[in-house]
């Protein structure tokens, strides 16, 4: 559902998601993210990337998590990458693609 | 205050937009599962919701509101259940064009006090079928029954896997707040069913809107008609929910030669013709003199209440009050639309005069809505239909139940009846799920041989006229 990579040289923390991120899945993911994401103990300089290469559905609750993490990470420190076109379109419809830096 | 309202509107539309994003990913099967669940839940509550609406608004007849809820749930569901509303919905190999259905986005649905629960159910079903989140704005006089309808539908939708916030409701009562939401940039469409002021506000909001126009439905009873049948149908329709449907009959037009027979038939079927003094009394309570619009105090009221308010005595069991009038227009208040069991009655010397009267009535506040003819003469039916400006010309049919579709004809069952440009609407159709889709057309290359085989250089030569070009264009090579 979600795995993590960290490249210390670039200070990039990547969360690799997969599958269907519906409301139930997001509840579990939320707990995992809280434990693993950088910055939980204070300010972090790490950049956070959500990689959605293998994601085929996102619920509104997942978008809310993205917003929350983006706010926590700070300006320019969060991005969403490798979306399937279907997911990219979903972020566009949500009107949050720019805030979330969806590429 | 205004800033708070804007923040509130932002929050509602943000949630709706999120729901829209999620809904966009649903396939047909997932969508249909949600629609079926909402249909069943609303249908199972048809009686309770009808009674609530009747009690809260003080309008109409609860048994008739049950029928409206059945139309809005069962009949609407039947009409849309097999419709394709997701992905490729058609392909024509001859033209090479395929059509793809895309949702619109958040829809603001304005609900009238006259048909509150039924219109709410109807709009929710057609919005969900087209994968559009819906925001319900109820009339303050029907806020409780609409809130309960929304609760039932929303719970059923969530249970069936619908996106969170796919159905929301804005608190009733604040016209200012409704206008703020109407003008919000994230609203994709306004489905405005209600009075002229509200519909105009929707059109002025800057967002696309599907509105309705007011009705003033004329009914012509031709000499070829079956009179007892016509009178019986008119009564069935005009007493339905005490006349609250905007497609209900407003005026009856007959020929002089038929007048006595038709009046006798109305009286036989328990209708009462007011005398001139009584007409004045009913006018005073039915139409607001300053605005020349119907008084809310008579809308959806039975004859007994209207008679008591007017201070007149009518026989017990009277079903409809009829006023024989000499003219049409604002000086004859009962020739205007009144959503109550009151009918204007006119007699014409001949058929052309009768049709002219119907045209005048049609143009007196009801352009584009509905009209009716009782006849068994196809030529007259065609002539009449061509002369009237009405989205629906109903033939030998009670107009309340006929215009909303399904029961008496094959019109789409709907509680939002388009009135065309005459009613300042974009369509004359009965609005349904297909009106809530953006249809993309994927066009395969199919070169037009006539264009490519003609000598196109001739178009640039001013000395060559249209006849020569057209001969060249249509030449069989």
Image: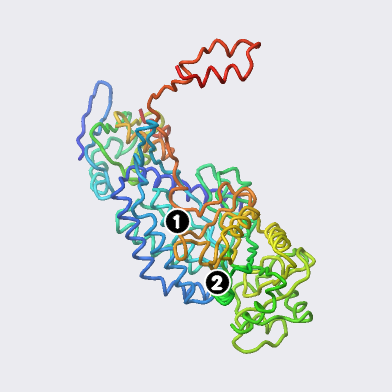
Q: Position of residue B208 (x, y in %)?
A: 55, 44
Report whether residue B186 is seen: yes
The image quadrant of residue B253 is bottom right
What residue is rendered at 62% in x and 80% in y?
B265
Q: Position of residue A85 (x, y in %)?
A: 32, 31
Q: In the visual, does B84 lie left or right of A24?
A: right
Query: Mark 1 sits on what residue?
Result: B168
Q: Position of residue A72 (x, y in %)?
A: 37, 38
Q: Nearer the viewer, residue B322 or B48?
A: B322
Q: In the visual, does B160 lie left or right of B358?
A: left
Marker disc for residue B237: 2
Q: Is residue A62 above or below residue B61?
A: above
- Look at the numbered disc 2 and give the secondary structure of its residue: helix
Q: Chain of mark 2?
A: B
What residue is rendered at 36% in x and 38% in y?
A90
Q: Are marks 1 and 2 on the same chain?
A: yes
The image quadrant of residue B254 is bottom right
Q: Earlier in the sequence, mark 1 or mark 2?
A: 1
- Look at the numbered disc 1 and give the secondary structure of its residue: strand
Which color scheme does this rendered protein use?
A: rainbow
Q: Quadrant of the C terminus of chain B?
A: top left
Q: Is residue B109 above or below residue A30?
A: below
Q: Chain of mark 1?
A: B
**Label 2 CA crowd tier, 10 Å (few <14, some 14–19, many 20+):** many
What residue is rendered at 34% in x and 64% in y?
B40
Q: Nearer the viewer, residue B194 or B158?
A: B194
């Amino acid at each position: 559902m979600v795995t993590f990579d960290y490249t210390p040289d670039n200070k990039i923390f990547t969360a690799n998601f997969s599958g269907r991120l519906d409301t139930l899945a997001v509840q579990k993911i939320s707990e995992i993210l809280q434990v693993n994401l950088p910055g939980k103990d204070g300010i972090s300089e790490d950049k956070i990337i959500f990689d959605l290469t293998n994601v085929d559905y996102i619920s509104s609750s997942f978008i809310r998590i993205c917003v929350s993490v983006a706010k926590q990470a700070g300006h320019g420190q969060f991005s969403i990458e490798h979306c399937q076109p279907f997911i990219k379109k979903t972020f566009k419809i949500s009107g949050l693609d720019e805030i979330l830096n969806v590429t | 205050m205004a800033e708070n309202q804007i923040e509130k509107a932002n929050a509602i539309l943000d949630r709706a937009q999120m729901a829209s994003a999620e809904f966009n990913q649903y396939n047909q099967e997932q969508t249909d599962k949600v629609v079926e669940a909402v249909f069943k839940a609303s249908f199972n509550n048809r009686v309770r919701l009808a009674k609530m609406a009747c009690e809260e608004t003080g309008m109409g007849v609860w048994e008739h509101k049950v029928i409206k809820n059945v139309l809005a749930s069962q009949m609407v569901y039947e009409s849309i259940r097999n419709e394709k509303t997701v992905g490729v919905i058609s392909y024509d190999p001859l033209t090479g064009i395929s059509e793809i259905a895309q949702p619109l986005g958040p829809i603001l649905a304005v609900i009238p006090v006259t048909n509150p629960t039924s219109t709410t159910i109807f709009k929710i079903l057609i919005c969900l079928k087209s994968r559009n989140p819906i925001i319900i704005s109820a009339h303050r006089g029907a806020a409780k029954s609409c809130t309960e309808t929304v609760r039932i539908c929303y719970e059923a939708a969530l249970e069936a896997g619908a996106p969170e916030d796919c159905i929301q409701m804005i608190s009733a009562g604040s016209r200012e707040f409704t206008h703020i939401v109407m003008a919000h940039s994230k609203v994709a469409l306004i489905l405005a069913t209600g009075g002229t002021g509200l519909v105009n506000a929707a059109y002025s909001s800057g967002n696309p809107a599907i509105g309705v126009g007011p009705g003033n439905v004329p009914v012509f009873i031709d000499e070829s008609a079956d009179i007892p049948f016509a009178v019986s149908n008119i009564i069935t329709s005009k007493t339905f929910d005490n006349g609250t449907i905007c497609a209900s009959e407003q005026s009856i037009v007959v020929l002089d030669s038929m007048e006595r027979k038709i009046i006798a038939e109305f009286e036989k079927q328990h209708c009462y013709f007011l005398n001139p003094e009584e007409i004045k009394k009913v006018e005073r309570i039915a139409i607001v003199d300053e605005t020349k619009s119907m008084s809310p105090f008579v809308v959806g009221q039975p004859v007994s209440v209207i008679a008591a308010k007017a201070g007149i005595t009518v026989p017990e069991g009277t079903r409809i009050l009829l006023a024989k009038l000499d003219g049409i227009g604002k000086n004859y208040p009962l020739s205007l639309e009144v959503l109550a069991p009151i009918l204007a009655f006119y007699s014409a010397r001949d058929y052309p005069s009768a049709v002219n009267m119907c045209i005048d009535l049609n143009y007196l506040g009801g352009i584009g809505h509905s009209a009716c003819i009782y006849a068994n003469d196809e030529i007259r039916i065609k002539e009449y239909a061509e002369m009237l400006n009405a989205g629906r010309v109903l033939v030998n049919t009670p107009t309340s139940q006929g215009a909303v579709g399904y029961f008496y004809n094959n019109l789409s069952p709907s509680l939002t009846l388009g009135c065309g440009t005459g009613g300042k609407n974009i369509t004359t159709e009965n609005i349904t799920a297909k009106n809530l889709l953006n249809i993309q057309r994927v066009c395969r290359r199919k070169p037009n041989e006539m264009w490519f085989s003609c000598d196109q250089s001739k178009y640039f030569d001013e000395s060559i006229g249209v006849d020569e070009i057209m001969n060249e264009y249509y030449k069989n090579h």
